[in-house]
Amino acid sequence: MKHLLALIVGILFAQSALAEILVPARTIRAKEIISAEDLMFKNIQSPGALSNPEDVIGQEARIALYASRPIHAGDIGAPAIVDRNDLVKLIFRHGGLEITTEGRSLGRGAEGEYIRVMNLSSRTTVTGRITASGNIEVD
């Protein structure tokens, strides 16, 4: 009798834990921008899965997202505005001094992320933060 009661409670709990989460309607390759047509809802249990379309639409897939598999926050991110090997403007500011030069990105990233960049004048590698305009601010 205890086993039957535990089984019934387990089934009821499992059903109550089901939630509508977002899953890809098709396989989405890494670096693709996710649109509303790429998503559908699925009623399954998956801790940490995203359920709000506003959190996903317009974001970039960081990894391949397979159809009908849950999407988690770490699987997506802001779209990259700087790609590897892009020519970028390096900016160093300190007080009233501003120095700019040209660099080549050694990685890719979105606004606010830090990437490594090779200064084309000195051939040294520096790390800087990507700005909204695609420039790199070096600290």
Image: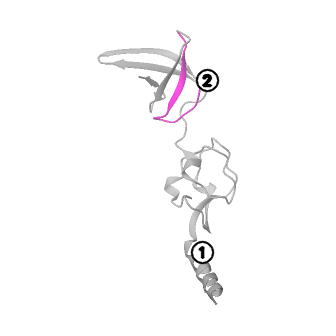
The image quarter in which residue 67 lies: bottom right
- Nearer the observer: mark 1 or 2; the answer is 1
What amino acid does circle 2 point to?
Asn
Q: Residue furthest top?
A: 122
Image point (59%, 76%), residue name: 15
Residue occupying the point 60% across, 55% down:
71
Placement of 17 over or under 25, stated as above or below: below
Q: Secondary structure at mark 1?
A: helix
Which label sits on residue 85?
2
Q: Position of residue 69 (x, y in %)?
A: 66, 58
Q: Which residue occupies the foreground of this view, 26 or 117?
A: 117
Decide: few, some or many residues near mark 2? Use Cα within 10 Å; few <14, some 14-19, many ≥20.
some
| Residue 19 position within the rendered picture, expressed as x and y whole percent measured from the top left | 56, 69
Residue at which label 1 appears? 14
- Give the magenta range: 106-121
Looking at the rendered image, the quarter that the N terminus falls into is bottom right
Q: Is residue 2 above or below residue 97?
A: below
User: What's the residue at 67%, 49% (across, down)?
Assistant: 28
Quadrant assignment, res 72: bottom right
Q: Is residue 96 magenta?
A: no
Q: Within the magenta stretch, is there residue 110?
A: yes
In three-dimensional space, the C-alpha distance between marks 1 and 2, rounded to whole angstroms, equals 49 Å
Q: Secondary structure at mark 2?
A: loop
Q: Main secondary structure of the magenta part?
A: loop
| Closer-to-camera residue (90/38) | 90
Percent coordinates x, y for residue 7 in the rendering: 64, 82
Q: Are marks 1 and 2 in contact (CB under 8 Å)?
A: no
Dot placed on the residue nearer the N-terminal end, 1 or 2: 1
